[in-house]
Image (cartoon, rainbow, N blue to C red):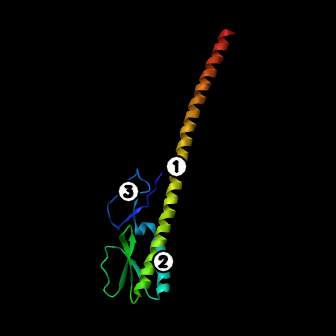
Amino acid sequence: MMYLLPRLIVKGSQIKPDPDLPFDKQLELFEIFSTREIQRIVTALSRLLDCSVSVVEPNALPDPECQREAILWELEPVGYLEAKNANTNQLRGAADIFVILLKEAVRFRMASDLHLETVVADFDALQKRHIRAGSAHEQSEVFLYEDHLQMMRCA
């Protein structure tokens, strides 16, 4: 079975994931990370770069006073890191770190989705077996009842 990494889209898009392809989901950057997680990442990157860093959506207008580095996913920017007075190489490194964290979060989400799908499939299979077993049990009770009636008639 082949699993595809989810393809990220910009916030506000109306593209829906194909339910027949559970791992080819259309996810937004802000669905992968909560606001709190992004804030923690930004705080850590700000400490590393010794300047204020922010994450902005791909369609946001650039701040002319800031350096801007793309957060690339499948060769497309899913957001940007912006910082005032940042070293360009350090900002590029910070964007690379952000992408590494993003990939790990996506892998975790894929594993979580796979686990959930497995649990649901196992539960469905168990229900089907239970229904079949119940049906077989009811049939055997009918046969036992008919045998009992037959023996009563013979006696």
Above or below for 22 versus 137: below
Q: Amino acid at mark 3?
A: Pro
Q: Secondary structure at mark 2?
A: helix
Q: Are the residues at dot 2 and dot 3 in contact (C-beta closer than 8 Å)?
A: no
Spot the residue most to the bottom: 85
State the residue lying farthest toward the right: 155
On screen, residue 49 versus residue 12, left or right, reads right
Residue 11 % position (x, y): 35, 68
Rendered location of residue 81, percent (x, y):
39, 79
Left or right? Give the position of 50 relative to 11.
Answer: right
Q: Quadrant of the C terminus?
A: top right
Mark 3 nearby-residue class (10 Å; few <14, some 14–19, many ≥20): some
Identity, as a three-letter code, of the amino acid under mark 1: Val
Quadrant of residue 131 within the rendered picture: top right
Q: CA distance from mark 1 to mark 2?
A: 34 Å
Q: Which residue is mark 3?
A: 17
Q: CA distance from mark 3 to mark 1?
A: 19 Å
- Mark 1 or mark 2, which has the lower sequence index? 2
Of mark 3 and mark 1, the one earlier in the sequence is 3
Residue identified by numbered label 1: 120
Identify the residue shown where x is 42% and y is 83%.
91
Q: Is residue 75 above or below residue 61?
A: above
* Residue 15: x %, y % from top left: 33, 59
Find numbered disc 1 in the image and state the secondary structure of the residue it sits on: helix
Local packing at callout 1 (Cα closer than 10 Å; few below 14, some 14-19, many 20+) is few
Q: Amino acid at mark 2?
A: Ile
